[in-house]
Amino acid sequence: MNSELIDQLTGSLGANGLPYTIPIHPNLVHLTIALFIIGLTFDIVGVLFPFQKWVFKFLAITVERDNLFDVGWYNMLAASIITFFTVTAGFYEMLLATPPADTKSAWGLQAME
């Protein structure tokens, strides 16, 4: 009875035997990296703001230096909050995954059970 149920579910499983088709962890990793890079970029632009003033004036964008640092800070805050969910999703998907037993890595290591 249980094997029939498992056989029915295996057709609808996603990558690595996850119960959904698109893994969540890689998407959250890329979101975290993007938020971190954007935060650093805005902080660097805020530091170099006097040199970039003519670019903003040319584009007719009203920018204040404090606002650039605020955007950088909020991006770093969002990245640190999303990191918790990224790690949680990574452990959740790692525990649900069914690694192939016959595959070895480039270093000759097998998948963990």
Image (cartoon, rainbow, N blue to C red):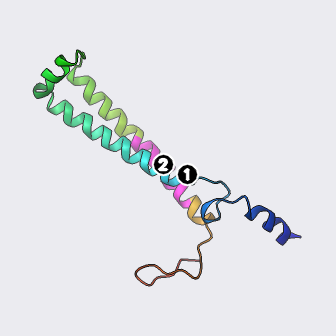
Q: Evaluate if marks 1 and 2 touch, with contact meaning CB atoms under 8 Å apart.
A: yes
Residue type marked 2: Leu
Residue displayed at 43% across by 45% down: 31
Q: What label sits on residue 24 in the rendered view?
A: 1
Provide the secondary structure element on which disc 2 rests: helix
Over which residues does the magenta segment extend?
Answer: 79-91
Q: Return the mark for residue 28.
A: 2
Rendered-image quadrant of the N terminus: bottom right
For the residue pair 91 and 6, the one nearer the viewer reads as 6
User: x, y (%) of residue 21?
Assistant: 63, 54
Residue closest to the far bottom: 108
Furthest toward the right, the residue is 1
Query: Under tag 1, what secondary structure?
Result: helix
Classify residue 35 by image quadrant: top left
Residue type at mark 1 is Ile
Q: Is residue 8 above or below residue 104?
A: above
Q: How far apart are the two marked residues, 1 and 2, measured between alpha carbons?
A: 6 Å
**Disc number for residue 50:** none
The image position of residue 44, as x and y in percent, is: 20, 37
Question: Considering the image in quadrants, where does the C terminus appear?
Answer: bottom right
Q: In the rendered view, would you say 19 is above or below 47?
A: below
Q: Residue at x 37, y 43 (%)?
A: 34
Left or right for 51, reference 15: left
- The answer to if 92 sits in the magenta stretch is no
Asked if residue 71 is positioned above or below residue 5 in the image, the reply reads above
**Neighbours of disc 1 within 10 Å: few (<14), some (14-19), many (20+):** some
Q: Predominant secondary structure in magenta?
A: helix
